[in-house]
Amino acid sequence: MILIDNRLQVAKLRLAYIVSFTMSSIFFAFSFVSNNSFISNNVSLFIAICLMLIFVYLIRIKPEYLYVQIRKNNTILVRTYSAFPLFRKYKSFEIPINAIVEIERKKNPFYPKPFIRIVVKTKKSVGTYPWLNLAAVPKVSYNKLATYFNNTLNIAKKVEPI
């Protein structure tokens, strides 16, 4: 059963990265090169700054592709990589469902959605997986994930739906 697959949202974000950077560069160049009126230069400079702020915001929230699947062998398959078109790091791991102890949730006021991290018990102590950024995950998919974790897993701390 697939809980999260945000491939479409990541494709849109990748396009937003490329378009905002390219268009802001074009508007910056136009505002400095053209000999048009003072108003058109200022308008193109304002548009370029707005597009660059969008680009910086996208870099700041670091959206990720996230694929979460419940497998038949009682494991959770998680695949993730950055939505930024350059310098991607692909991560994939399988988590045994019966080893999950807790789902940590970290909320930051500057991010649109929380981060989650899965904590598992190991032979010697407790292990943690990397934080999963849910910025590019649709609300429906996040709520589906929260419902699964709350109803199926025996964890003390419940995951709150959005």
Image (cartoon, rainbow, N blue to C red):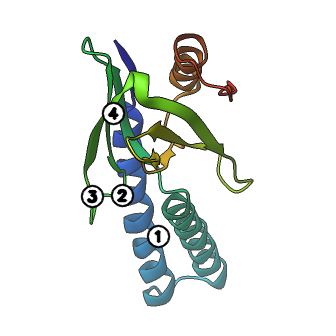
Mark 2 against mark 3, which lies toward the viewer? 3
**Marks 4/2: CA–CA distance:** 13 Å
Residue underneath mark 2: 84
Q: Quadrant of residue 7?
A: top left
**Label 2 or label 3, whichever comes before in sequence order:** 2
Residue underneath mark 1: 24
**Marks 4/3: CA–CA distance:** 16 Å
Residue at the far front: name it: 124
Determine which of the numbered discs, if any, sits on residue 89 in the image. Answer: 3
Q: Label 3: state its secondary structure.
A: loop
User: What's the residue type where badge 3 is placed?
Assistant: Lys
Q: Are marks 4 and 3 in contact (CB under 8 Å)?
A: no
Q: Residue at x 45, y 38 (%)?
A: 121
- Few, some or many residues within 10 Å of mark 1 (<14, 14–19, 20+): many
Determine which of the numbered discs, if any, sits on residue 77 in the image. Answer: none
User: What's the residue type where badge 1 is placed?
Assistant: Ser
**Label 1 or label 3, whichever comes before in sequence order:** 1
Q: From the viewer's perspective, is residue 37 above or below residue 155?
A: below
Mark 4 against mark 3, which lies toward the viewer? 3
User: What's the residue type where badge 2 is placed?
Assistant: Phe
Camera-side residue of 142 and 154: 154
Q: Label 1: state its secondary structure.
A: helix
Q: Label 4: state its secondary structure.
A: helix
Q: Are marks 4 and 2 in contact (CB under 8 Å)?
A: no
